[in-house]
Image: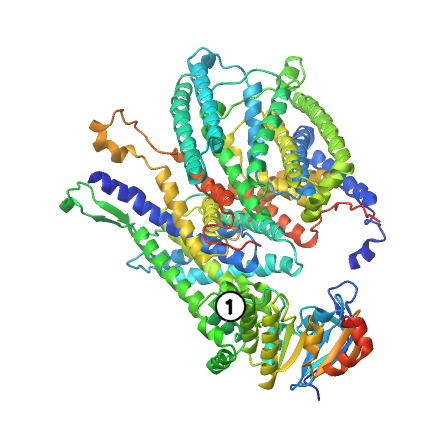
Amino acid sequence: MSDTAIRRGLDLNDPKMRSIVLFAAMFVIVLIVGYVQGAANTTLLLTQAIAYALIALGLNIQWGYGGLFNFAVMGFMMLGGAATVTISAPINPLFWDSEGPLLLGKALAMFLVGALVVLAARQSHRIGIKGGWKTALIVLAWFVSYVAYRSQIDPAAAYIESTAGYIGGLGLNPMLGWLIGGVLAAIMAFIVGKISLGLRSDYLAIATIGISEILRAFVKNMDWWTRGTQTVSPMPWPVPLPQQYQADGVSIADSFVFARLGFLALALVILVVVFLFIQRAYGGPWGRMMRAIRDNHIAAGSMGKDIKGRQLELFVMGSVLIGIGGAMLTSFNQIFDPSSYQPINHTFMVWVMVIVGGAGNNLGVLLGTFLIYIAWVISDPLAQAIFKNLSAWSQSVGWGVIPEIDSRALQMRVFVLGVIITIALRYAPKGLLPEVVQKQK
Amino acid sequence: MDELIFFINRVLISGTVLGSIYALGAIGITLVFGILRFAHFAHGDMMTMGAFIGFCIASILAGMGIATPIPIAFVVLPLAMVVTAAIALGIDKGFYAPLRRRGVPSVTLLIASIGVTLMMQGLIRLFFGSGTRSLYINETKEIFRIDMSAFGGSRPISITEPQVLMIAVTVVLVLALHFFLTRSRLGKAMRAMSDNAALAQVSGINTALVVRVTWIIAGSLACVAGTMLALDVALMPDLAFNIVLPIFAAAIVGGLGHVYGAIVGGFLIAFAETLAVFNWTSILRPLTTWLPFDLPANLALVPTEYKLTVAFVILVITLLARPTGIFKGISS
Amino acid sequence: MALIELKHVVGGYGGAPILNGVNIAIEQSDIGVIVGPNGAGKSTTLKAIFGLLKVTGGTIEFGGEDVANSLPDKLVPKGLSFVPQEKNVFTSMTVEENLEMGAFTRTDDFRDTMRWVYDMFPVLAEKRRQPAGELSGGQRQMVAMGRALMSKPKLLMLDEPSAGLSPRYVIEIFETIVRVNKEGVGILMVEQNARQALAFASKGFVLASGQNRFTGTGPELIADPEVAKSFLGG
């Protein structure tokens, strides 16, 4: 209560005033960064930040609206990225001219057969198989289907990787890829949610971290699909690339600015549409119900709400946004590199954005995203500069230079991220723009 | 015979070594959960940090020209344990205790522990770079070969010095912990607090002291696990972050809060992983003539790249079939 | 001078106070029983004495010393013990370990005390190696009381010791409480079975809305028509 009195002069407690002041401050920061780093870098930063904003809003739906733990942000982002590769990367004629599609088709058929066998085993009680026998049958069905699928996919994968490299893409519009990325993330979220949403929150956290790692292991090692560590690049854009501007006679420096501005505008439109949509949903009866469930499981359950179903809804909705954001990021960066995905700069950074911004408050999450992303991006050159100076100083006093400055400076931002989380939890647990709780009379 | 030796080397020894690491890590996680009721995600990096502390002390001593018959990093382990335990106490005091006092939900503490993980990772890489080092400082890793020719084997059973040390240390520590928890006043108080924290407080048990003891044990066990792992493999900044998931799986499978469960869970996960990526062709080869089909070159249940998924699949099955773990864990 | 004396105690869990001026005085030879309707602040009074909630007004003196807002690990060595109403045994630990935990604050040899407790509850001696979680409700209540007695308290506080027990066990528990008191331990308990408990109470306190309504010996209160009408169900 004491800080209430201190801030009363500025009236930062009024949520509207607070938002305006903080967003103005952020705008000033963006201007400063823009001035220092130039237009090309700033448009780059802002576009990436918008993609992250979509992801953070997705997580906010899950954690802020629903209190659901999702530490699989990285996994869903990767799925989005992989989907974009398949939809928008150029067609690989080597693959389509080879036996590859046939082999892959067989593997897919085997997968479906296997899925049917497992489903049939799960229904075996209908023909009188019960108890331990049923369990044994299900385990056997899983095993047989797994072996059968492996017997098809392994040679197919080896064949594709040796003849065509990977299956390539379909050469379609990247925006379709983003959409499919969202759909893929939704399907995965549905499966994950079905399995794990009933778990206690800390179990759910561990489970989703595990799911994220498994998704990474798959995307990284399914070379036939995503080219794995060899990366897919360059990925096309839905808007003209810098090279196209250059062909029209625009100078190289300007071409990057123009092209990125084009992408930025597109991303901004998507963000605004998404934001308005989820903001409306939050304020409406659906959002009220979700918050009721979050704040009091038992009461909501006793009022006849289908809690698990509603939570699954949130989990899928949030994951769609994460998938779309991840896909957009892949397109914009023009490269899909599975090994560049790390829990730190994907999952955990997005969590920091949501916590610092204010879980449950979409505006706050937007603010948090931009602030954290800017801090993340500029902390690298900043730390490098500090280290260079330190190194020069240590050299001048005769202690020698600091080795590996680049990689060490890069680690500084991991440290800073950790510091931000712990400080935020301790001193501003509700974030910069806390959720506005409507009082019910 | 050679096939059996191969199996012993690849499964029995590797599994036991891996299981020891998982068990030591999982005990720490399970103890912290039992007393403080939150999943301490930074435990993996505490292990890594412990190994680096051991490395620093060992390097200083090695630099002074001190040589020991067994690896110096192992000799200085008690000292490294003390330092790590002190740091664990400091972390609790600085980051978790203030949140606890405010009565935050356990998920907030989990997120805080992720923040601590990031800080530790950043700091470790800041000071030591991201390269790989050996904890064998000017020493060579001995390999013990047990000749099996008497039993008709042409290859020996081989086990390295750190592996022998690790298994021995695990046995000693587990026994010590067992006696501590069942015989000593403080150990019983720890079990009491893990069982019913409110009643422990009412009984006049100094709960703050129990919390401190918990961090001391968790920190020193983490240091042992990290150092032994680094001796066996190599010292690198992501040493233990990569295995924090199987360790959590082990603790959950064993029943969170349950020390013996964590040990069983650790070995269960370790053997499941080892067996899943084991190439069965190598021991089925003598049967080639009787088999109706040709043996493929690699007949493993799971390709090595997907080893991580094994622990997780076991975790998911456990959570679905018996959410409190094999031994009944704490369910609050 | 009373063993424990509460004067105008005010306190609660941070919000509006639940206790609005409670007065209680107990000698070591007394059995004090607090009765009253739900939400009167009966259990809260015990918790306030034991430092489990914030006391914002009034004084709590134990043995002449101000102990308001002291924590249990300071109060137990002074001779104060508390048996909570629910979850009052360590279920995963053996009966004997439960008793040992009661003696945690003691640094002297407590084997005599343990023998004393086993004499009082022979059934516990039989089951000393069994986990307390496997015992029946009545036996658990004995473990809980035994645990609290292990610190050799001057005052034993019990929160509804008869809750959830069958009538036969209720009588047994009450008899045990009287016996413990005869051994020189002051008793302060909260009871729902008000009439039964007041029958053997040397001091009775009727609380309502966090304040004393009536104070007297147990039989006096039972005989008081107004108390009987409003608080003892006619």
Q: Residue B97: horizontal and vertical position, in percent?
A: 61, 60
Give the class, few, some or many, for how many residues have Cα within 10 Å of label 1's Cα (few <14, many ≥20): many
Mark 1: secondary structure: helix
Q: From the viewer's perspective, is residue A209 above or below residue C203?
A: above
Q: Observer-nearest residue: B146 or C37?
A: C37
Residue B213 visible in the picture = no
Q: Residue B158: horizontal and vertical position, in percent?
A: 25, 46
Q: Amino acid at mark 1?
A: Ala
Q: Kindly indicate the quadrant of the structure image that contains residue A181.
A: top right
Query: Measuring 59% from the left and 64% from the top, which residue is drawn there?
Result: C87
Q: Kindly indicate the quadrant of the structure image that contains residue A410.
A: top right
Left/right of residue B146 with respect to residue A422 in the rendered view: left
Q: Observer-nearest residue: B107 or A410?
A: B107
Q: Residue B88: horizontal and vertical position, in percent?
A: 52, 59
Q: Label 1 marks which chain's residue?
A: B
Left/right of residue C4 with respect to residue A121 in the rendered view: right
Q: From the viewer's perspective, is residue B101 above or below residue C156?
A: above
Q: Observer-nearest residue: B64 or B317?
A: B317
Q: Quadrant of the N terminus of chain B?
A: top left
Q: Quadrant of the C terminus of chain B?
A: bottom right
Please give the residue where the numbered disc 1 appears in the rendered image. Answer: B189
How many discs mark residues in the rendered view?
Answer: 1
Q: Residue A390: horizontal and vertical position, in percent?
A: 56, 48
Residue B196 visible in the picture = yes
Query: Measuring 73% from the left and 46% from the top, which residue is drawn there?
Result: A432
Query: Measuring 49% from the left and 15% from the top, which residue is drawn there?
Result: A92
Colouring: rainbow
